[in-house]
Amino acid sequence: MSMHQVQDRTWAVDRYERPATLDEALRILATYGERARIVAGATDLLLEMQRNVRQVDVLVDLSAISGLDEITNHDGTIELGPLVTHRQVVTSDIVASGGLPLAQASLEVGSAQLRNRATVAGNLITASPANDTISALVALGATVTLTSATGSRVVSLDEFYTGVRTTIMSPHEIMTSITFKELTAEWAGMFAKVGLRSAQAISVVHAAIVLERDDSTVTAARIALGSVAPTIVLADAAELLIGSELTEDVITRCAGAAAAEVRPIDDVRATAAYRTEMLEVAVERMLRSLSAGTEAATWPGRTMTLSHGDAPSASVVSVSGSDDIEVTVNGVATRGADGTSVTLLDWIRTNARDTTDALLTGTKEGCAEGECGACTVHMDGQAVLACMVPAAAAHGSAVTTVEGLTSDVDRALEESLVSCGAVQCGYCTPGFVMSASSLIAEHEDLTDAEIRDGLGGNICRCTGYTSIVEALDIAGRVTS
Amino acid sequence: MTVGTNVAKRDAWDKVTGAARYPGDIPVPGGLTVKVVFSNEPHARMVSMSTQAALATEGVIDIVTAADIPMNEYGLTMFDQPVLIGVDGTGRSPVPSDVSRWEADSVAVVIAETAEAALAGAGALEIVWEQLPLMPDLATADAPGAPLVHPENGRDSNTYYSYRIRKGDMDAGWAAADIVVEGTYTLPHQEHAYLQPEAAVSYIDDEGRVTVEVAGQWTHEDRAQIAHALELPEEEVRVIYPPIGGAFGGREDMTLQIVMAAASLKLHARGINRPLRCVWNREESIVGHHKRHRAQITTKWGATSDGRIVAVDADAVVDAGAYNYTTNKVMANLHMTLTGPYNVPHVRIDSRAVYTTSVPGGAFRGFGSPQAAFAAESQMNKIALALDMDPIEIRLANALRDGDDSVTQRPMPDGVSIAEVVEELARASSWSTPAPTTTTVASIKTLGAHRSSIRTGRGVACALKNVGFSMGFPERCEATVTLYGEDEIDTAHIAHAGADVGQGAHTAFLQMTAEAVGVDYDKVTGTFSDTATSGDSGSSSASRMTFMAGNSIQGATEEAVKAWIDGDRPAEGHFRFVPPPTEYIDAETGEGLAVIAYGYVAEAVDVAVDIETGHIRVGTVWCAIDVGRAINPQTVKGQVEGAIVQAHGYVLSERLRLDDGKIVNPTFSGYLVPGTKDVPDHIETILLEIPDPLGPWGARGMAEMPFIPYAPAVIAAVHDATGVWFSDFPLTPDRVLAGLKDAQDQR
């Protein structure tokens, strides 16, 4: 008999390596080949291991290597290091002004907690056709640098993919850089997606368009379409725009032609027919928006990141399955085993204790796939999903759980949640408290829409959210 | 006065600081881990199972199989389900234990030192199955000559339960009708998605009782079923509910209770007394417990030209799944609400439940009424449209009133308030003079709303819902109140078994005790949800807990006050509240006094539909609800908002996918419950307080009611916006767009 697949979600690796230099990381890859895997946020990889999509023996974490988490603009070329997170992208002026499609796509990835950990490079390498940043970067004409112990190669991103979740990357290579040309005045671009809910939606279709115009005549165009084929489609329909103005006639012809190029599938999210149709509608509306110059109209003035800035650089570590790891939990240095086979969530619940020696179980598992936010903790000042962090990745970090919130501001927040009736069954509540604590610390004078944005990664099944939003509204006003 | 005030929930501070310990958080020093192994077979006969290799796995302590369950059967309203599937059962139950009828039937319980060892042991079970025919849905299971899911019940088809209503004279009804509207409605599954996945701890307590700490809805029923399956006196079993992470009906039937007790007893017999813990992951939770029922309803309504409903004819077929769970009771509610809250003279209804080899259907907020209301209220809205009548007016013209007979041909319980509720809804929502809607939908991310393709509309629906078990099911609720002090009563204590599933029941108990005794709320303490300390409360379901518990608290307080006057210090009073009995309805005519109390609700919504993408946004929801008396208005409002958002997911986004009876998307990334940005823009709650004659301080049950009219109200609003009636849901964008296209093609 075969066990029901949902009953085995275990994972384990032999080693977790956080080397000091890129050369050392490359040496590990050269040694272990396919059995090693680069991790940054590990948000995709952890799920792949738990669902037995991928078998890995050694995780190689680059976060101790300095300089890999920068976004720069050198003479009109925007470069993202391999550790740049989606949070960094959505708060980067460089990207907002010179690569709007990437900024828009990054804001549509997961929740704020996920964006604090997940990297753009990781999103590219997972190579799911539903991954939002791929269409944005393909439309931006991005190239990626792949580095191995024997040298580097620069590859156009549209030639990087070979199929669903497969790429030309060899197991010995690290994606060390993502670059694209800044969108200057004559250029414009945008990203859009159709999903089944308003936040942390997996794309039904997504698309990005980048145009160059001389006056109003299109002189160059790239249209990248996602979730409609095994890999991102760079549509030939873009040719129809060249030499024309974006008239209604040109727009509808181009959108129709783009839809004719794709061959989507039926899956749990939508039918193939619906995808094709949505692609046409999306391209049409995007072109109209670009024509009207409103492509940035919904880009928020400030983003809700649930973070107090960048995480401190990590220390060099090498953890094997039999080693203890050490995490400072609520100010207490805590040691425990199994860092290479459990998530930070499980590790906290089985190792961290309060002053009465009771285990800290306030951090909850609701979904174990980063969807519900019940496991939200603060890791080095950022709200993260503890179920999406391999415990070893927190080695040397400072983690705060719901039990560790002691400031007056946090106390006022908790009191507000109680007095507003925002606590029913209460199982989601610690996660909401942790997200809300970050949100109130991050911004003053939050609007209801911003509160809902900031809490978009937390699911409550009891309250309907009204009372929770009200509680934050009151707590925010009291403390600001 | 404590009743009627917004005291903060007694347990809220522990929950907000992370101190509350749910079943999976309870420390088990020196404990062992339990893995309940699913069969992974939707329909198959077990030929053999060897536990030899599993028992030899390092770290495995023992394995519980069917052989360890003396009476291998359970079920809340009928024993049709084996506790464990196996070939070595005692054979004492008439239910064959060697057949797996859904993927989450369990075959073994592996007890081990660690989770890893338990999993390894589970993987080492050697089982040989013989495949049996799959009947994963009504189309296959209800087909003539379909193989039987439960041949042991002696029936010749998979239909195993049915009800009828024969009221008035259908010929006379159709003769009086000026118009006839027909409809067929398809109802989907819904997953409870409570945030806390199933978990339990078990041990032998210091008085030798096998004890299970678990999240459930009815401690004493859990205890009774454990005792039945394990053939123990009930006194030797103890069930405790620690904080419960949501329920919504999803914990009314059991998951871990019996197997955890069996595991602790098996080890105890070997002299091992280490506590056990089992925690399910989200996917095990979704695969492993029942759902809101799928159903098919075909119905025909006749009305006079002035809008009087004169005849209702309906056939309902309910997909029970592999086991009954509470299907027969859910179906009774569905059956008795297919005419809505209306006085209809001529009625014929046939409802039946069909076994399939699929996930069982069972209790879920609304308990059959949402399915019936979708059909009934859609019919009402279609008739209003056909007659060019206002949907509020036609409802008032047909509303049940005091003194009217119910559809089961007995007088409605006094305090019928559906007309008042509908009138209040119309007033509060400015139904006759609506403000222009600003509701819109940004269906494509980053693009904002696309004005030219947005259509807006409004819809309304209303409902009634029974309070209490009904249909002759024995009702009772016990409370013990103790008064402390010397000359005057200083403090009071309430002991009650009722489950607080997050709705605030325990806080309401404390408030009602304070009110009954006449002391301040903070002078009352409580001991709750433990079969060792309280009598039977009945379940937290059927919107009954505040209603029944309040009556029991009033009675217990009276007894305690008598003892106090007699000089007892402390003075204890115990009371077992038994409301007026209800009757099972007649098998031929459906006659009977099935219900003794109702709650009434009406809702209006406005929506925006993007007709190019099929996305829908709900703007404002108005909910008028008669709660009789709000014991804690803030908590009541929380139930309204929570129910509406849960119904919002039901009608718009929550789509459970099955393939050959197996759930394809048992995850929160695949099954989409609403998040902060998906919910309606505004929820306006309007509480009416028209006392229920039997309710404590006049309170009615209310926590299910706001769920019920939401789906048909949204469907009506979508019709108002687009001109298209949808007869199935959830209205996912692809389904909406396909529906709009079909309608266009037919024009």
Image (cartoon, coloured by chain):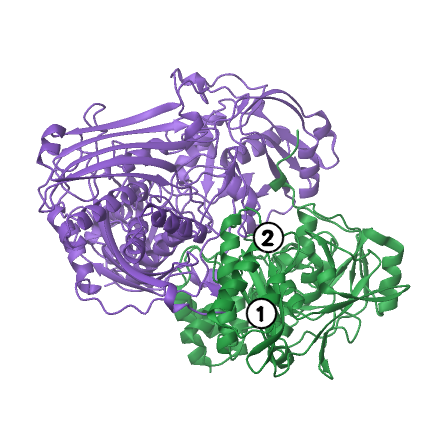
Chain colours: A green, B purple
Examine the rendering and report whether any part of residue A474 can be seen. yes
Q: Amino acid at mark 2?
A: Ala
Residue A388 location, quadrant = bottom right
Q: Which mark is residue B141?
A: none
Q: Quadrant of the N terminus of chain B?
A: bottom left
Residue A169 location, quadrant = bottom right
Q: Which residue is mark 1?
A: A241
Viewed as shown, does residue A365 lie left or right of A310?
left
Number of residues whose C-alpha sits closer than 10 Å to that of mark 1, classed few (under 14), some (14–19) or many (20 or more): many
Q: Nearer the viewer, residue B672 or B327?
A: B672
Residue B111 location, quadrant = top right
The mark that comes first in sequence, 1 or 2, is 1
Where is residue B279 drawn, in percent x and y?
57, 44
Where is residue A27 drawn, in percent x and y?
89, 61
On screen, residue B145 above or below B511: above
Q: Nearer the viewer, mark 1 or mark 2?
A: 1
Q: Amino acid at mark 1?
A: Leu
- Distance between mark 1 and mark 2 Cα atoms: 45 Å
The structure residue drawn at horizontal position 36% and vertical position 23%, both measured from the top left corner, is B160
Viewed as shown, does residue A1 lie left or right of B579?
right
